[in-house]
Structures are given as C-alpha cells and as structure tokens.
Image (cartoon, rainbow, N blue to C red):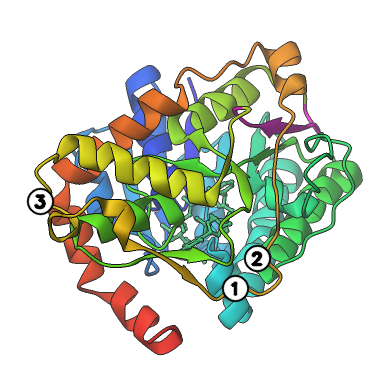
C-alpha cells in the first residue's frame, strides 16, 4: 500500500493521474497539494473528494514547512511531482513564475523530502519527478528521436526551468541518496487539458466559431501521447523503475501541427455534418496562420525503447481512438471549459494577445 503526495493534482495530468490511481489501486491513499493557479481547478477532483482515501490540500510547493508536515502527518512514502508552470507561451511573456515554481519549488520539495525521509527518520521512499521532452531541445527532420542520453539543450524559459529541476532531482540522488526517478514525456492530450494548449484550444475554438491560430507555417512536429498512457508509464516507473533512473515516455506518434488541426476539424465536421460549428462551413475554414512563437522548437520526438524493454511499457490508446475520446469529452463537458474561458484565461489572453 502506498501513501502518495501528488503535487499539482488539480491540473491536467495530475487530475488524470489521481483518477487513474484511485481506480487501479483503491487501497492506496492520495493527498493532493495544489496552489490552484489559473491552471488548477479543484472542481476537477470533485469525484475524488468523495473517496475517504483522498484528501485535497490548498497550498504551495514553495511552502517547505507545509510540505514537511504533509509528509509526516500523512505518512507519505511516495511523492509524484506534477506541479509546474507548464505553458511555453506564458514562459516567453513572463519567465519569473517558471523559475519560482519549477526550479525553486522543486528544490523546496527536495529539501523537505531529504529532511523527513533521510535526515529525521530514514525510511523507504520515492520521489518521482515529472518532466518533459522539451529539455532536449529541437530536432531536425532527419534526426533520430530523443533518448535518455540526448544532451539537454532547452530553448524556452519553460524548458530551461524544467531542465534545471531535472538536474536538481538527479543531484539529490547522487549527493544525498534520495530515492528518485524522473520521467520525460512528450506532448500529452486528453480530458481536463487547459484550453491554452493546442488540442483543447482548437476543439473549443471550432465550437465557438473562432479562428484556429496556427503558429508560422504549422509544419512544426510534436509527438502526441494520451494522458492515460503517460500515467501508465509513471505507474510502471513507481512500481518497477530503477532508483536514480530517467525514463522517456512517448507514443511514437509524430504529427505536424497543421495536420493535427485539420484532423480535429475533420472529426468535428464528421460529428456535426450539418455545420453547427464554424458558421455552417467546414471548420478548416477557421484555420488562420499567425505570427510564429519566439524560438519555436521545430520538432520533438521520443524514443521510448528503454521504458518499453525495461518495464514492459506499451501505450494502450492509438491516436485515432484517443483524439476521438478527447473530442467527445470536450463536447460532453462544455460547462467545464466555458467556466474557464469566462475567467482568468481570458484576462491573460487579453493582456498578451489582444
Ligand atoms: P497544468 O498547467 O495543467 O497543471 C499544473 C498544476 O500545478 C495546476 O493545478 C497548478 O495549480 C499547480 N501548481 C502550479 N504552481 C504551483 C505551486 N507553486 N504549488 C502548488 N501547485 C502548483 O500542467 P500539466 O499539463 O498537467 O503538466 C503537469 C506536469 O507534467 C508539469 O510538470 C509539466 O512540465 C509536465 N509535462 C506536461 C506535458 C504536457 O503535454 N502537458 C508533457 C510532458 C510533461
Ligand atoms: P502547446 O500545446 O502549447 O505545447 P508545447 O508548446 O509544449 O509543444 O503547442 C503545441 C504546438 O502547437 C507547438 O508547436 C505550438 C503550436 N501551437 C499553435 O500553432 N497554435 C496555438 O494556438 C498553440 C497554443 C500552439
């Protein structure tokens, strides 16, 4: 039985992780620590909050005394660290929060974990750090995908802050013997993804008959993985991963942005052939090429051979099934995204884009 502290559990991947874990391991206890930034939504966890094995704590990972008390009071043996500022565009407009949360926040968690798990009363434990393929930088079209040995070359402030946090986690293992693992995953999609990211943004803009902003030529490539398959990889690492190791998680599923956008347009058109979206026209008519992102990475791709061969990892969702389910989720949960669109997201867009 595990007692797990999940940081950032009210965000996109953290929420999906909580439901994945409570469903698969009903005997385990989960405490979520989340600061409820613009990206966090306690309502995501309303079904989990009915479960006596689950507890939500509103607080910041920068609050070391709070983290220490959670580790002690809830007899936490496993920490899964999702909390982060996660949007590249925001990191370009305002990097400071990314340095605070992603670097200083991760270091605060490491200090708390070292104190409680190693210094005060040594006990078995695991610190799992969730990271991204963006730490490896950008690939050329004929480069082989990133492996765990690809040198770090982060290009955005977001990627640089995640790279720094990965190095700190590694250092706490090498220097103090903290029992750590790290996963670097490719782009996720699925339920509860905040509608500033490409896939939910496109779905929602089609439904709202708004332009679909494609940065530059739209030929940039991302390697998309359904969020449940990310969490499956984290599950395998927590249960079978080697202490001190880093694992890449990916689905071997490279797409250009423009093809992703067109695919979503086609699937929604198939769903509403009489055109309840996009003013009765095919949604592709909403595609609008806009100014490119600064320092835009051209291509990401993950080689997931290590987690596949060492831990038996294999994604369960094809892109075809995963993207259809995701579109259905957004169609079924209009209240969820309308509330978000009416709130802080719009004010940030207004400041930075209007
Ligand atoms: P998200 O932005 O949807 O959620 C982040 C969560 O962290 C929110 O609930 C927010 O309230 C919380 N948070 C932020 N700052 C905090 C702080 N100081 N203290 C406590 N809580 C705080 O992010 P996501 O997409 O779910 O990403 C989760 C993790 O996975 C991140 O570490 C990200 O770098 C990583 N990752 C994401 C992707 C992806 O495609 N989304 C891919 C690979 C890795
Ligand atoms: P995003 O979902 O922000 O993830 P990341 O930057 O972490 O890869 O963006 C995915 C890709 O889609 C990226 O190449 C940027 C591009 N993009 C657009 O073309 N238009 C948009 O409105 C957004 C949000 C992203």
Q: Residue at x 87, y 42 (%)?
A: 150
In this view of the protein, can residue 73 be seen by the observer?
A: no
Q: Earlier in the sequence, mark 2 or mark 3?
A: 2
Q: Earlier in the sequence, mark 1 or mark 2?
A: 1
Instruction: Look at the numbered disc 3 and give the secondary structure of its residue.
Output: loop
Question: How would you rate the neighbour count of disc 2 (Cα within 10 Å): few for under 14, some for 14-19, many for 20 or more?
Answer: many
Label 3 CB less than 8 angstroms from ligand 2: no
Q: CA distance from mark 1 to mark 2?
A: 5 Å
CB under 8 Å between callouts 1 and 3?
A: no
The residue nearer to you, when weighing 147 against 69, is: 147
Please name the residue that numbered disc 3 is placed on.
276
Q: Which residues are magenta?
A: 243-251
Position of 35 relative to 335 (above/below): below
Taking the image as shown, residue 269 lies to the left or right of residue 163, namely: left
Q: CA distance from mark 2 to mark 3?
A: 37 Å
Instruction: Look at the numbered disc 2 and give the secondary structure of its residue.
Output: helix
Q: CA distance from mark 1 to mark 3?
A: 35 Å
Please name the residue that numbered disc 1 is placed on.
91
- Where is residue 184 drawn, in percent x and y? 68, 41
Nearer the observer, disc 2 or disc 3? 3
């Amino acid at each position: 039985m595990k007692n797990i502290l999940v940081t950032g559990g009210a965000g996109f991947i953290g929420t999906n992780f909580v439901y994945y874990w409570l469903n698969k391991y009903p005997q385990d206890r989960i405490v979520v620590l989340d600061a409820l930034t613009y990206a966090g939504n306690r309502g995501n966890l309303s079904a989990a909050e009915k479960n006596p094995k689950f507890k939500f704590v509103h607080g910041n990972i920068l609050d070391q005394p709070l983290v220490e008390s959670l580790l002690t009071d809830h007899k936490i043996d496993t920490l899964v660290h999702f909390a982060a500022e996660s949007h590249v565009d925001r990191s370009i407009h305002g990097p400071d929060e990314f340095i605070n949360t992603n670097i200083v926040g991760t270091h605060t968690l490491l200090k708390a974990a070292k104190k409680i798990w190693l210094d005060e009363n040594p006990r078995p434990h695991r610190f799992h750090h969730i990271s991204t393929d963006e730490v490896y930088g950008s690939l050329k079209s004929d480069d082989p995908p990133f492996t765990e040995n690809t040198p770090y070359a982060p290009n955005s402030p977001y990627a640089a802050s995640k790279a720094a946090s990965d190095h700190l986690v590694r250092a706490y293992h090498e220097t103090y013997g903290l029992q750590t693992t790290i996963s670097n995953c490719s782009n996720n999609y699925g339920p509860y993804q905040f509608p500033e990211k490409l896939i939910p943004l496109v779905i929602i803009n089609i439904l709202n008959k708004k332009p679909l902003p494609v940065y530059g030529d739209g030929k940039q490539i991302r390697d998309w993985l359904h969020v449940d398959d990310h969490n499956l990889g984290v599950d395998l690492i927590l249960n079978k991963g080697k202490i001190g190791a880093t694992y890449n998680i990916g689905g071997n599923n490279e797409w250009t942005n423009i093809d992703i956008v067109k695919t979503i347009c086609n699937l929604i058109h198939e769903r509403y052939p009489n055109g309840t979206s996009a003013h009765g026209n095919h949604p592709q008519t909403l595609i609008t090429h806009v100014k490119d992102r600064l320092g835009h990475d051209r291509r990401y791709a993950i080689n997931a051979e290590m987690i596949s061969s060492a831990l038996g990892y294999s994604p369960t969702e094809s892109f075809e099934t995963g993207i259809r389910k995701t579109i259905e989720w957004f169609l079924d949960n209009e209240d969820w995204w309308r509330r978000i669109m009416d709130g802080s997201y719009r004010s940030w867009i207004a400041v930075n884009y209007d």
